Image: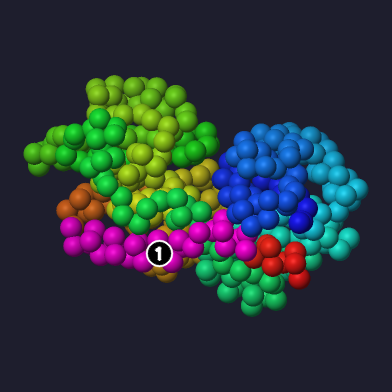
Amino acid sequence: MAYFVIVAGESSGDILGSSVIRELKKNNPGHEFQGITGPRMTEAGCESWFDIEDLSVMGIFDVIKHLPRLYKIRSQVIKKIIERPPDAFIGIDYPEFNLSIEGVLKKRGIQTIHMVSPSFWAWRENRIKTFNKKIDLMLCLFPFEEKLLVEQGLRAIFIGHPLADSIPIVTDQIAAKTDLGIDDDLVICLMPGSRRSEISFHAKLIFDAANKLKNELATSGLDRVRFLVPSKFPDLKDILIKYHPKDVDKYTFLTDSKRAISASNLVITKSGTSTLESALYKKPTVVIYKMPTISYLFLKLLNVVKTEFAALPNILLEKEIFPELIQNEATSENIKNEAINWINQNDRVDGTIEDLTQLHKQLRKNAGEKAAQIIEKAVAS
């Protein structure tokens, strides 16, 4: 029997954490878990010191505003751990918060395990030099991360990606459309972002592109087109009504991105985890991203971004399988043209599906079970 402190800071971490807890308990029901949890981790059997909502902040100014509260939570977590040292501390993602705790604990001889490697390969690559001082074991979601970290002397193991586990290798688009009550000939999923800052840059742009796309398709005789918009922001519909009030009947707004992507023929999304989700559903995708001009110039000037591509599937496959339209290239006309290219090139779509199927199989490793096995060995040694 072992005692673990486990800390997640976001919903995705709660999902992965609950899976790991269940797998560890499956092998040894006597294992004990405490820490910062979401509802899934609590349900799985982790005693909650704080809720992940207590750590929920978005954007640099929100972080600054809540720093005193975050520092207080961090101090209380460290105090509890020192008072009763666990067999291992497991930090799930949320790197700035968890790494700061892990650095303190490792100095005290407490084993530290970090799940979900920070994206050192994309920016702030110097962070990798600090990992050895804070982390005993890194559990990675992508195979290339293991290789890069091991080369730097860190113990790292690839466990696969939870999204790849949760999405079937083959999905039924017709059934997904039926489930949503859709019978249109062409279904396009629009994903402008999960944060308000992203919405402000991408919503009108994507709706403008969708309007142009609808009109061009109509001239070719294809007018049974449905746009799906999965989002937690109800004001997205207000943006559509403001700029394209006559198009509202062509749109369906919902909250579940998986249902929307599964039912779609094509996805237009901002860069981020949604590109991986789209890839795992084997959907042709157009990737866009815009940010404040000064931020973009700053990143370019300092050469902060180290990857050739922005979208995760392109990075993982080492080629531009999804077209990327970044900053000034992200115009409604360019988005429309890339979407038309996908619609008119069946051979390209078939080849893309083959590539994405191989990627899915590479990432589908039952991450929760594999992580639990590795953690069990780590605390036993």
- At 34% from the left and 43% from the top, the residue drawn is 261
Q: How is the image coloured?
A: rainbow
In the drawing, does residue 179 fall left or right of residue 9? Answer: left
Asked which quadrant contains residue 358, the reply is: bottom left
Q: Where is residue 295 in the image (x, y as percent from the top left)?
A: 57, 48
The residue located at (57%, 45%) in the rendering is 15
Q: As displayed, is residue 310 above or below residue 212?
A: below
Identified by mark 1, the residue type is Lys
Residue 1, relative to residue 289: is it above or below? below
Secondary structure, mark 1, is: helix
Q: Residue 112: horizontal and vertical position, in percent?
A: 76, 60
Query: Dominant secondary structure of the magenta stretch?
Result: helix
| Quarter in which the N terminus is drawn | bottom right
> In the rendered image, which residue does mark 1 sit on?
361
Q: Where is residue 163 in the image (x, y as percent from the top left)?
A: 47, 52
Residue 1 visible, this orientation: yes
Which quadrant, please, contains the C terminus?
Answer: bottom right
Mark 1 crowdedness (10 Å alpha carbons): few <14, some 14-19, many ≥20: some
The residue depicted at 78 percent of the width and 53 percent of the height is 3
Residue pushed farthest right? 83
Residue 4 lies in the magenta stretch: no
The residue drawn where x is 47% and y is 34% is: 200
Foreground: 199 or 349? 349
Magenta residue span: 346-373
